[in-house]
Amino acid sequence: MKRVCVFTGSNPGNHEHYNAAAVQLGEAIAARGCELVYGGASLGLMGSVADAALAAGGRAIGVMPRGLFRREIAHMSLTEFHEVEGMHERKAMMASLSDAFIAMPGGLGTYEELFEAACWSQIGIHAKPIGLLNVRGFYEPLLELLRHTVREGFMRETSLSLFLVESDPARLLERLAAYTPPQGAAVR
């Protein structure tokens, strides 16, 4: 595992725990000798995880569509910054650059990125690990929704194993690094 893609918000959230976790995650990524791949913003949790990775001597790679430059304010101190045309190109580039995915707390964009990565794994487009950094139990309602989806017959129970869930950033990175794709998973 050389590069970890982090999906998270360009907002800070309502609790300092979220920012503290973003800083811990950025530091832990750098301490493992991994590179951060993320959405390229300097604001919110996105900015905090990048700043922490860089401050710890790591590398941070941002990918941002031109149309978001004003709203998300591009981070100008990154190791690499890729300017792309739109959101589809952003997600595709982030996925191709990364060996693993982590979703931190965030909004609709974070959910959308997370579910696309999970869907791609479920249908065999990739076999990369997907982690949920469950700060303050943020992902508990989503996990319950996924279990409900299984109970209602719209998803197989084995799909729940696509998500590695931890509240500690370093422990989550350990689990991602030790991940073995399910037998028969496609690697493309």
Image (spheres, rainbow, N blue to C red):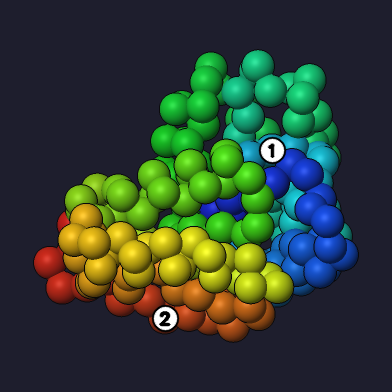
> What crowding class fits label 1: few (fewer than 14 Cα within 10 Å), some (14-19), or many (20 or more)?
many
Q: Secondary structure at mark 1?
A: loop
Residue 125 appears at what percent x and percent y? Answer: 24, 48
Q: Amino acid at mark 1?
A: Gly
Vertical relation: 10 (above or below) 66: below
Q: Residue at x 79, y 53 (%)?
A: 13
Q: Is residue 96 left or right of residue 107?
A: left
Q: Residue at x 65, y 16 (%)?
A: 67
Is residue 177 among what the camera can see? no
Marks 2 and 1, Cα distance to the nearest angstrom? 27 Å
Q: Which mark is residue 89?
A: none
Q: Amino acid at mark 2?
A: Ala
Residue 42 appears at what percent x and percent y? Answer: 81, 40
Whichever of labels 2 and 1 marks the residue nearer the N terminus, that label is: 1
Q: Secondary structure at mark 2?
A: loop
Residue in front for this viewpoint, 61 or 110 = 110
Residue in front for this viewpoint, 60 or 90 = 90
Q: Residue at x 51, y 27 (%)?
A: 87
Q: Which mark is residue 40?
A: 1
Residue 88 appears at what percent x and percent y? Answer: 44, 27
Q: Residue at x 78, y 44 (%)?
A: 11
Residue 91 appears at what percent x and percent y? Answer: 47, 36
Is residue 41 among what the camera can see? yes
Q: Which residue is mark 2?
A: 178
> What crowding class fits label 2: few (fewer than 14 Cα within 10 Å), some (14-19), or many (20 or more)?
few
Vertical relation: 92 (above or below) 163: above
